[in-house]
Amino acid sequence: MFYQRWRNWPWGRLCPLHTSHVTGPLHTGQTRLVAAFLLGSLMPFAFSPYDYKWLAVLAFAGWILLFMRGKAFSSGWAFGLGWFGIGAWWLAPTFHTFGPLAWPWAILATTLVGFVLGLFPACLAWGSYRLVEKGAGKGAGDSPRMLVVFPIMMVGEEWLRGHLFTGLPWTPPGSLLLDTPAIGWAAIVGVYGAAFLPALLAVSLAFILRFKYYRWGLAGAAIAGVCLLAAPAPYRADGAVHRVALIQANIPQKLKWNADFLNETMHRYVRLSKQAAKQSDLIIWPEVAVPLFLERAPEWRAWLLRHMDEWKTPVLFGGLKLDDGGRLAKPVAHNGIYLFQPGRETLQFVGKQHLVPFGEYVPSWIPFLHALVPNIADFQPSEDSGVLQGAHGRYGSLVCYEAIFPREARQRAATASVLINVTNDAWYGHTPATWQHLQAARMRAVETGRYLLRAANTGVSAIVAPDGTIQQTMDWFTQGAVLGEYRDSDVRTPYQRWGDVPLLGLVVPLLFVVWAGWRNT
């Protein structure tokens, strides 16, 4: 009776529990692609600021039911276009407002992002289907092997998405473990490995809905439940306690590079910092809080240092550094973080190493395109350690975009006692991108077992504990300071120690088998 009712419902005809009973006009390739696209468009709502995590499991399960019937690559591409094309809608107003691109071109550029990133789910679906089909000797839809293959393949797909095309691991499924009892796994396997658990839940649900293999689905769900209950506790920081002030000045993006607004920008940061200095051991300003080259503005440099010295408090602030490179060399600009320490004229500086393509530099293979940020100079990646030595510890820098990459945080945390994330999310306006950026940064705290101190121009500024929870924050698009405490940490989590090597040791052989199976077809 249950099966008959399911079959008569519209979604039952799109995702039938038993392929031998598929009939009617809904069983077409075009309808399957539309269904996959609609399922993929649900994925952004599983992440911040919505956090309907269960939607990701449902969307993945429905998608699995679709591609297990064949046409896996096209179904995966449609799912990815919905996930990343619809999910990255905020890129269109960013391109239009700050590009500037006309609306048709901005929408086209956003759609192209969805098409490119959609290749990753497409390869995931195709690889999973082919591997199961070869191993089972029959249709992939009739093999419970998918319970094992799909989660492992998803781990590999997420790793590739974080590295190919310079990497863009935006809204990774592994971050869904935040604020759940399973978050401790991220300190062992990282965000890419953490994708295994939601993938296992999804494929288990898909097999339960197929009814014919519901026992396999229940077994997979039971394993997922054990992983949830057996999750290790997140690491804790147990070093010295320090007080910090995260300054959120709320400078409008349209005025950030306006010379007429520079005086207001500098005085606003100084005013907010002076109020917070007496309650802080460290003050942090956001990315490019000082929107000029101090090397070419000695008056402003002296003015800043004079005020900072009065507070008797170290200050980390985002800024630009220009290396002239001699009279004949082209000047090289870096985006990074300065450290001021009271009583010292010299400023320490570390630069951003993972730059934003098309935003901070133009890839060499398409030199005719212009950067989207104001063309002060062509930014170059820095080659320093990314760690600043302060009086109260060592600060590992993550400048804006770098916070979405596990590798950057691991490199800094190797010698740093706390992670510092400075960013300017005013580019995103009042869109979900700001919250998704914060969600990604929270995973870096868990992976490294360190506090993460995030100072954002318009928000969301926050003190993030090593378990990924937000300890203190404030409303976005407001002026003020986030005041709180953090602890130093020198722990080395398993992920900090080994990174993704153990995961690749599992995934690479599977990818080879998929490739070999295709060659033998």
Image (cartoon, rainbow, N blue to C red):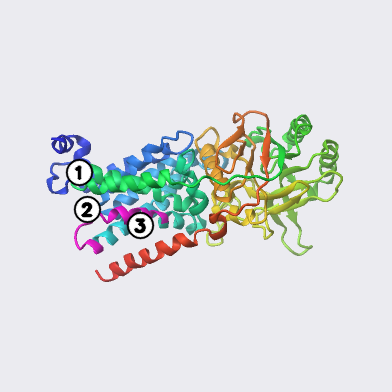
Residue 282 placement (x, y as % from top left): 74, 40
Question: Does 473 appear above or below 424?
Answer: above
Real-space Cα distance between discs 3 and 1?
Answer: 27 Å
Real-space Cα distance between discs 2 and 3?
Answer: 17 Å
Question: Does 422 appear above or below 501?
Answer: above
Q: Determine the image quadrant of residue 324.
A: bottom right
User: Looking at the image, how many numbered discs can be counted on the residues?
Assistant: 3
Q: Quadrant of the C terminus?
A: bottom left
Real-space Cα distance between discs 2 and 1?
Answer: 12 Å
Q: Which mark is residue 141?
A: 2
Number of other residues with Cα within 10 Å of mark 1, as a class: few under 14, some 14 to 19, many 20 or more:
some
Number of other residues with Cα within 10 Å of mark 2, as a class: few under 14, some 14 to 19, many 20 or more:
many
Label 3 SS: helix
> What residue is rendered at 72% in x and 40% in y?
242
Q: Which residue is mark 1?
A: 211
> What residue is rendered at 22% in x and 45% in y?
214
Query: Amino acid under label 2?
Result: Gly
Residue 325 in view (yes/no): yes
Does residue 36 appear to the left or right of 278 in the view shown? left
Query: Amino acid under label 3?
Result: Cys
Q: Determine the image quadrant of residue 299.
A: top right
Pick the residue in front: 389 or 260.
389
Pick the residue in front: 174 or 80.
174
Mark nearer the viewer, 2 or 1: 1
Q: Quadrant of the N terminus?
A: top left
Q: Which residue is mark 3?
A: 123
Pick the residue in front: 63 or 358.
63
Q: Give the magenta range.
A: 134-155
Mark nearer the viewer, 2 or 3: 2
Contact (Cβ within 8 Å) of mark 2 with mark 3: no
